[in-house]
Image (cartoon, rainbow, N blue to C red):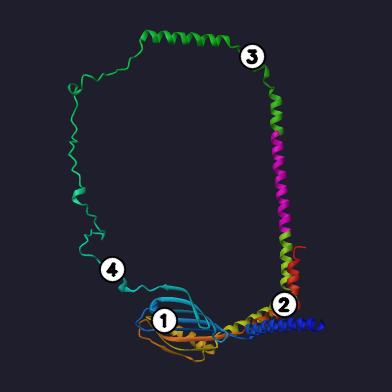
Amino acid sequence: MLHILWLIFKVILILLGVILGIALLILLLVLFCPIRYRVYAAKEEEAPFKAASARARISWLFGGVSANAAYEDGTLRVFLKLLFLTRTLMTKEILKKETAAKTEIINPEEPKTGNNVPVQTVPAEAVHHVPAVDTELKPSSKEDIPPDVIRVEPVLPDEPARAEKEEINHTEDSVTQESTPDSEPEKEGTEEEPGITEKVRKTGIIEKISGRIRSVGNKISAFKIKISKTMAKAAWWRDFIFHERTKAAIALILREAKFLVRHVLPKRIRGRLRFGFEDPSVTGKILAFMGAAYPRHRNRVALTPVFENRTVIDGETEISGRIYLVVFAAAAVKIILSRNVRFVIRTFKNRNR
Protein backbone atom coordinates (compact mmCIF):
# COMPACT_ATOMS: atom_id res chain seq x y z
CA MET A 1 0.00 0.00 0.00
CA LEU A 2 2.79 2.43 0.88
CA HIS A 3 4.61 1.45 -2.30
CA ILE A 4 1.55 2.41 -4.40
CA LEU A 5 1.17 5.74 -2.59
CA TRP A 6 4.83 6.50 -3.06
CA LEU A 7 4.55 5.66 -6.77
CA ILE A 8 1.55 7.99 -7.15
CA PHE A 9 3.37 10.75 -5.28
CA LYS A 10 6.42 10.23 -7.49
CA VAL A 11 4.33 10.52 -10.69
CA ILE A 12 2.72 13.72 -9.41
CA LEU A 13 6.13 15.23 -8.63
CA ILE A 14 7.41 14.29 -12.08
CA LEU A 15 4.38 15.93 -13.73
CA LEU A 16 4.83 19.07 -11.64
CA GLY A 17 8.52 19.18 -12.54
CA VAL A 18 7.74 18.83 -16.25
CA ILE A 19 5.11 21.58 -16.09
CA LEU A 20 7.44 23.91 -14.18
CA GLY A 21 10.27 23.14 -16.62
CA ILE A 22 8.07 23.96 -19.62
CA ALA A 23 6.87 27.17 -17.98
CA LEU A 24 10.47 28.16 -17.16
CA LEU A 25 11.57 27.38 -20.71
CA ILE A 26 8.76 29.52 -22.15
CA LEU A 27 9.65 32.36 -19.76
CA LEU A 28 13.32 32.18 -20.76
CA LEU A 29 12.41 32.15 -24.44
CA VAL A 30 10.15 35.18 -24.02
CA LEU A 31 12.75 37.13 -22.05
CA PHE A 32 16.00 36.18 -23.76
CA CYS A 33 14.98 35.24 -27.30
CA PRO A 34 15.16 38.52 -29.26
CA ILE A 35 12.40 39.98 -31.36
CA ARG A 36 14.03 41.01 -34.64
CA TYR A 37 12.72 43.49 -37.17
CA ARG A 38 13.85 44.30 -40.69
CA VAL A 39 12.67 46.92 -43.18
CA TYR A 40 13.72 47.08 -46.83
CA ALA A 41 12.66 49.71 -49.40
CA ALA A 42 13.74 50.44 -52.98
CA LYS A 43 12.78 52.96 -55.65
CA GLU A 44 13.93 53.55 -59.18
CA GLU A 45 14.48 57.00 -60.64
CA GLU A 46 11.80 56.86 -63.30
CA ALA A 47 9.16 55.13 -61.21
CA PRO A 48 6.74 57.12 -58.98
CA PHE A 49 6.55 56.60 -55.25
CA LYS A 50 3.45 54.39 -55.60
CA ALA A 51 5.44 52.01 -57.78
CA ALA A 52 8.21 51.59 -55.20
CA SER A 53 8.67 48.27 -53.39
CA ALA A 54 8.96 47.74 -49.64
CA ARG A 55 9.05 44.81 -47.23
CA ALA A 56 8.81 44.67 -43.43
CA ARG A 57 9.23 41.70 -41.12
CA ILE A 58 9.01 41.12 -37.36
CA SER A 59 10.18 37.67 -36.28
CA TRP A 60 10.62 35.75 -33.04
CA LEU A 61 11.96 32.38 -32.02
CA PHE A 62 14.72 32.47 -34.65
CA GLY A 63 12.27 33.17 -37.45
CA GLY A 64 9.78 30.45 -36.51
CA VAL A 65 7.06 33.01 -35.78
CA SER A 66 6.90 36.11 -37.95
CA ALA A 67 4.59 38.85 -39.18
CA ASN A 68 5.29 40.09 -42.70
CA ALA A 69 4.11 42.93 -44.91
CA ALA A 70 5.07 43.36 -48.56
CA TYR A 71 4.24 46.11 -51.06
CA GLU A 72 5.10 45.23 -54.65
CA ASP A 73 3.54 46.15 -57.99
CA GLY A 74 0.95 48.33 -56.29
CA THR A 75 -0.36 45.48 -54.08
CA LEU A 76 -0.09 45.37 -50.27
CA ARG A 77 -0.02 41.94 -48.67
CA VAL A 78 0.05 41.18 -44.93
CA PHE A 79 0.52 37.60 -43.70
CA LEU A 80 1.58 35.60 -40.65
CA LYS A 81 3.99 32.71 -40.70
CA LEU A 82 4.26 29.93 -38.09
CA LEU A 83 7.01 27.47 -38.96
CA PHE A 84 5.77 26.10 -42.32
CA LEU A 85 2.23 27.45 -42.11
CA THR A 86 1.29 30.78 -43.74
CA ARG A 87 -1.93 32.69 -43.23
CA THR A 88 -2.77 35.77 -45.30
CA LEU A 89 -4.46 38.54 -43.31
CA MET A 90 -4.94 41.20 -46.00
CA THR A 91 -4.38 41.66 -49.71
CA LYS A 92 -5.17 45.13 -51.06
CA GLU A 93 -4.52 46.56 -54.49
CA ILE A 94 -3.42 50.16 -54.01
CA LEU A 95 -2.02 51.06 -57.42
CA LYS A 96 -4.62 50.30 -60.09
CA LYS A 97 -3.24 49.07 -63.36
CA GLU A 98 -3.85 51.22 -66.38
CA THR A 99 -4.77 48.24 -68.52
CA ALA A 100 -7.72 47.33 -66.27
CA ALA A 101 -9.97 49.85 -68.01
CA LYS A 102 -9.13 48.43 -71.44
CA THR A 103 -10.26 44.87 -70.65
CA GLU A 104 -13.97 45.71 -70.99
CA ILE A 105 -15.52 43.67 -73.81
CA ILE A 106 -18.14 45.44 -75.86
CA ASN A 107 -20.66 43.40 -77.84
CA PRO A 108 -20.99 45.01 -81.29
CA GLU A 109 -24.39 43.42 -81.88
CA GLU A 110 -25.92 45.00 -78.74
CA PRO A 111 -27.15 48.53 -79.39
CA LYS A 112 -25.72 51.23 -77.10
CA THR A 113 -26.79 54.72 -76.30
CA GLY A 114 -24.57 57.75 -75.86
CA ASN A 115 -23.96 56.83 -72.19
CA ASN A 116 -23.05 53.20 -73.06
CA VAL A 117 -26.38 51.96 -71.68
CA PRO A 118 -27.92 49.02 -73.57
CA VAL A 119 -31.19 49.78 -75.34
CA GLN A 120 -33.98 47.31 -74.66
CA THR A 121 -35.77 46.21 -77.80
CA VAL A 122 -39.48 45.35 -77.71
CA PRO A 123 -40.88 42.71 -80.09
CA ALA A 124 -43.39 43.83 -82.67
CA GLU A 125 -46.08 41.43 -81.39
CA ALA A 126 -46.11 43.18 -77.96
CA VAL A 127 -46.93 46.59 -79.46
CA HIS A 128 -50.61 47.55 -79.27
CA HIS A 129 -52.02 50.13 -81.59
CA VAL A 130 -53.70 52.87 -79.59
CA PRO A 131 -56.14 55.08 -81.51
CA ALA A 132 -55.30 58.72 -81.59
CA VAL A 133 -57.24 60.96 -79.29
CA ASP A 134 -58.17 64.42 -80.33
CA THR A 135 -57.08 66.54 -77.40
CA GLU A 136 -57.95 69.89 -79.00
CA LEU A 137 -60.20 71.97 -76.75
CA LYS A 138 -63.26 73.48 -78.35
CA PRO A 139 -65.37 76.24 -76.87
CA SER A 140 -68.67 74.97 -75.48
CA SER A 141 -71.98 76.56 -76.27
CA LYS A 142 -75.47 76.29 -74.94
CA GLU A 143 -76.49 74.30 -77.97
CA ASP A 144 -73.98 71.58 -77.09
CA ILE A 145 -75.56 70.99 -73.64
CA PRO A 146 -77.94 68.03 -73.77
CA PRO A 147 -81.54 68.62 -72.76
CA ASP A 148 -81.34 66.07 -69.89
CA VAL A 149 -78.93 68.27 -67.89
CA ILE A 150 -80.68 70.49 -65.29
CA ARG A 151 -78.89 73.65 -64.17
CA VAL A 152 -79.27 74.48 -60.46
CA GLU A 153 -78.93 78.09 -59.37
CA PRO A 154 -78.65 79.25 -55.71
CA VAL A 155 -81.77 80.78 -54.26
CA LEU A 156 -81.24 83.93 -52.15
CA PRO A 157 -83.54 84.68 -49.18
CA ASP A 158 -86.06 87.44 -49.53
CA GLU A 159 -85.09 90.89 -48.33
CA PRO A 160 -88.16 91.42 -46.04
CA ALA A 161 -87.54 88.18 -44.18
CA ARG A 162 -83.90 89.14 -43.59
CA ALA A 163 -84.93 92.55 -42.16
CA GLU A 164 -87.39 90.93 -39.76
CA LYS A 165 -84.68 88.57 -38.43
CA GLU A 166 -82.27 91.46 -37.83
CA GLU A 167 -84.95 93.43 -35.94
CA ILE A 168 -85.69 90.45 -33.67
CA ASN A 169 -81.97 89.99 -32.86
CA HIS A 170 -81.63 93.71 -32.05
CA THR A 171 -84.52 93.59 -29.57
CA GLU A 172 -83.06 90.49 -27.84
CA ASP A 173 -79.67 92.21 -27.35
CA SER A 174 -81.31 95.30 -25.82
CA VAL A 175 -83.30 93.13 -23.37
CA THR A 176 -80.16 91.29 -22.21
CA GLN A 177 -78.33 94.57 -21.68
CA GLU A 178 -81.17 95.92 -19.52
CA SER A 179 -81.40 92.74 -17.49
CA THR A 180 -77.64 92.73 -16.49
CA PRO A 181 -77.00 94.64 -13.22
CA ASP A 182 -74.65 97.57 -13.16
CA SER A 183 -71.33 96.54 -11.57
CA GLU A 184 -69.59 99.89 -11.64
CA PRO A 185 -70.60 100.92 -8.10
CA GLU A 186 -69.21 97.67 -6.70
CA LYS A 187 -65.85 98.29 -8.43
CA GLU A 188 -65.69 101.74 -7.01
CA GLY A 189 -66.23 100.35 -3.53
CA THR A 190 -63.42 97.74 -3.85
CA GLU A 191 -60.68 100.15 -4.93
CA GLU A 192 -57.77 100.44 -2.51
CA GLU A 193 -56.59 103.67 -1.07
CA PRO A 194 -53.66 105.30 -2.95
CA GLY A 195 -51.48 105.61 0.19
CA ILE A 196 -51.54 101.89 0.95
CA THR A 197 -50.64 100.88 -2.63
CA GLU A 198 -47.71 103.32 -2.61
CA LYS A 199 -46.35 101.80 0.62
CA VAL A 200 -46.67 98.25 -0.77
CA ARG A 201 -44.87 99.25 -3.93
CA LYS A 202 -41.99 100.86 -2.01
CA THR A 203 -41.57 97.84 0.30
CA GLY A 204 -41.48 95.51 -2.74
CA ILE A 205 -38.75 97.58 -4.38
CA ILE A 206 -36.70 97.59 -1.15
CA GLU A 207 -37.01 93.79 -0.83
CA LYS A 208 -35.88 93.28 -4.44
CA ILE A 209 -32.84 95.51 -3.91
CA SER A 210 -31.89 93.78 -0.67
CA GLY A 211 -32.31 90.34 -2.29
CA ARG A 212 -30.00 91.28 -5.15
CA ILE A 213 -27.41 92.63 -2.70
CA ARG A 214 -27.55 89.37 -0.74
CA SER A 215 -27.15 87.28 -3.95
CA VAL A 216 -24.14 89.37 -4.99
CA GLY A 217 -22.58 88.87 -1.57
CA ASN A 218 -23.15 85.10 -1.74
CA LYS A 219 -21.54 84.95 -5.19
CA ILE A 220 -18.51 86.92 -3.95
CA SER A 221 -18.07 84.60 -0.96
CA ALA A 222 -18.38 81.49 -3.19
CA PHE A 223 -15.81 82.96 -5.58
CA LYS A 224 -13.42 83.58 -2.68
CA ILE A 225 -13.81 79.99 -1.50
CA LYS A 226 -13.14 78.69 -5.02
CA ILE A 227 -10.03 80.85 -5.34
CA SER A 228 -8.73 79.64 -1.98
CA LYS A 229 -9.25 75.99 -2.99
CA THR A 230 -7.50 76.58 -6.32
CA MET A 231 -4.56 78.24 -4.61
CA ALA A 232 -4.32 75.35 -2.14
CA LYS A 233 -4.26 72.81 -5.01
CA ALA A 234 -1.62 74.83 -6.87
CA ALA A 235 0.52 74.99 -3.72
CA TRP A 236 0.17 71.22 -3.22
CA TRP A 237 1.20 70.47 -6.82
CA ARG A 238 4.15 72.87 -6.53
CA ASP A 239 5.38 71.17 -3.37
CA PHE A 240 4.76 67.73 -4.90
CA ILE A 241 6.64 68.38 -8.15
CA PHE A 242 9.60 70.17 -6.59
CA HIS A 243 10.02 67.64 -3.80
CA GLU A 244 13.44 65.96 -3.74
CA ARG A 245 12.05 62.44 -3.89
CA THR A 246 9.76 63.36 -6.79
CA LYS A 247 12.71 64.80 -8.70
CA ALA A 248 14.70 61.60 -8.05
CA ALA A 249 11.82 59.42 -9.29
CA ILE A 250 11.38 61.49 -12.47
CA ALA A 251 15.15 61.35 -13.15
CA LEU A 252 15.11 57.55 -12.77
CA ILE A 253 12.18 57.14 -15.17
CA LEU A 254 13.77 59.42 -17.79
CA ARG A 255 17.08 57.58 -17.55
CA GLU A 256 15.45 54.19 -18.06
CA ALA A 257 13.29 55.51 -20.92
CA LYS A 258 16.37 56.87 -22.69
CA PHE A 259 18.11 53.53 -22.30
CA LEU A 260 15.10 51.67 -23.74
CA VAL A 261 14.94 54.02 -26.75
CA ARG A 262 18.62 53.38 -27.50
CA HIS A 263 17.96 49.66 -27.18
CA VAL A 264 15.06 49.73 -29.67
CA LEU A 265 16.82 51.84 -32.32
CA PRO A 266 18.21 50.00 -35.40
CA LYS A 267 21.59 48.36 -35.03
CA ARG A 268 22.25 48.02 -38.74
CA ILE A 269 21.64 50.56 -41.49
CA ARG A 270 22.93 50.20 -45.02
CA GLY A 271 21.96 51.34 -48.50
CA ARG A 272 22.40 54.04 -51.09
CA LEU A 273 20.51 57.24 -51.80
CA ARG A 274 20.71 59.62 -54.73
CA PHE A 275 18.64 62.74 -54.27
CA GLY A 276 18.22 66.20 -55.71
CA PHE A 277 15.60 68.97 -55.85
CA GLU A 278 14.79 71.92 -58.04
CA ASP A 279 16.00 74.22 -55.27
CA PRO A 280 19.66 73.38 -54.57
CA SER A 281 19.37 74.85 -51.07
CA VAL A 282 16.94 72.06 -50.08
CA THR A 283 19.44 69.47 -51.29
CA GLY A 284 22.16 71.12 -49.23
CA LYS A 285 19.98 71.15 -46.09
CA ILE A 286 19.21 67.43 -46.40
CA LEU A 287 22.90 66.69 -46.91
CA ALA A 288 23.72 68.69 -43.77
CA PHE A 289 21.08 66.79 -41.79
CA MET A 290 22.49 63.46 -42.90
CA GLY A 291 25.92 64.65 -41.88
CA ALA A 292 24.62 65.53 -38.41
CA ALA A 293 23.12 62.01 -38.14
CA TYR A 294 26.51 60.40 -38.89
CA PRO A 295 26.76 58.75 -35.41
CA ARG A 296 23.68 56.69 -36.31
CA HIS A 297 24.42 55.57 -39.87
CA ARG A 298 28.25 55.91 -39.67
CA ASN A 299 28.60 56.35 -43.40
CA ARG A 300 26.83 53.05 -44.10
CA VAL A 301 24.44 54.85 -46.44
CA ALA A 302 26.10 56.08 -49.62
CA LEU A 303 24.79 59.58 -50.34
CA THR A 304 24.93 61.10 -53.83
CA PRO A 305 23.55 64.64 -54.04
CA VAL A 306 22.43 65.98 -57.42
CA PHE A 307 22.62 69.77 -57.94
CA GLU A 308 21.01 69.92 -61.38
CA ASN A 309 17.81 71.90 -60.61
CA ARG A 310 15.63 68.82 -60.98
CA THR A 311 13.91 66.41 -58.60
CA VAL A 312 15.71 63.08 -58.36
CA ILE A 313 15.06 60.45 -55.67
CA ASP A 314 16.14 56.85 -56.08
CA GLY A 315 17.99 54.20 -54.14
CA GLU A 316 17.49 51.40 -51.65
CA THR A 317 17.92 50.98 -47.91
CA GLU A 318 17.76 48.24 -45.31
CA ILE A 319 17.22 48.75 -41.56
CA SER A 320 17.34 45.97 -38.99
CA GLY A 321 17.48 45.63 -35.23
CA ARG A 322 16.49 43.45 -32.26
CA ILE A 323 14.61 43.87 -29.00
CA TYR A 324 15.16 41.86 -25.82
CA LEU A 325 12.15 41.78 -23.52
CA VAL A 326 14.41 41.07 -20.54
CA VAL A 327 15.70 44.64 -20.86
CA PHE A 328 12.15 46.01 -20.52
CA ALA A 329 11.44 43.66 -17.62
CA ALA A 330 14.61 44.77 -15.81
CA ALA A 331 13.74 48.45 -16.30
CA ALA A 332 10.18 47.89 -15.02
CA VAL A 333 11.43 46.04 -11.90
CA LYS A 334 13.98 48.76 -11.19
CA ILE A 335 11.30 51.46 -11.42
CA ILE A 336 8.73 49.61 -9.32
CA LEU A 337 11.19 48.71 -6.53
CA SER A 338 12.47 52.26 -6.25
CA ARG A 339 11.49 53.91 -2.95
CA ASN A 340 11.16 57.31 -4.56
CA VAL A 341 8.71 56.00 -7.17
CA ARG A 342 6.63 54.29 -4.49
CA PHE A 343 6.60 57.52 -2.49
CA VAL A 344 5.34 59.43 -5.52
CA ILE A 345 2.59 56.86 -6.19
CA ARG A 346 1.48 56.80 -2.53
CA THR A 347 1.43 60.61 -2.29
CA PHE A 348 -0.50 60.97 -5.52
CA LYS A 349 -3.15 58.48 -4.38
CA ASN A 350 -3.65 60.40 -1.10
CA ARG A 351 -3.80 63.85 -2.69
CA ASN A 352 -7.51 64.38 -1.84
CA ARG A 353 -7.21 63.51 1.82
Q: Is residue 154 above or below residue 32?
A: above
Q: Residue at x 71, y 58 (%)?
A: 227
Q: Position of residue 109 (x, y in %)?
A: 20, 63
Foreground mark, 1 or 3? 1
Residue named by callout 1: 53
Packing grade of label 4 (10 A; few <14, some 14-19, many >=20) is few
Packing grade of label 2 (10 A; few <14, some 14-19, many >=20) is few
Residue named by callout 2: 336
Tag 1: amino acid = Ser
- Give the secondary structure at mark 4: loop
Q: Which residues are magenta?
A: 204-228
CA distance for labels 4 and 1: 29 Å
Tag 4: amino acid = Glu
Q: Is residue 285 above or below residue 119?
A: below
Residue named by callout 4: 104
| Labelled disc at residue 185 | 3
**Which of the two residues, 9 or 101, is positioned nearer the viewer here?**
9
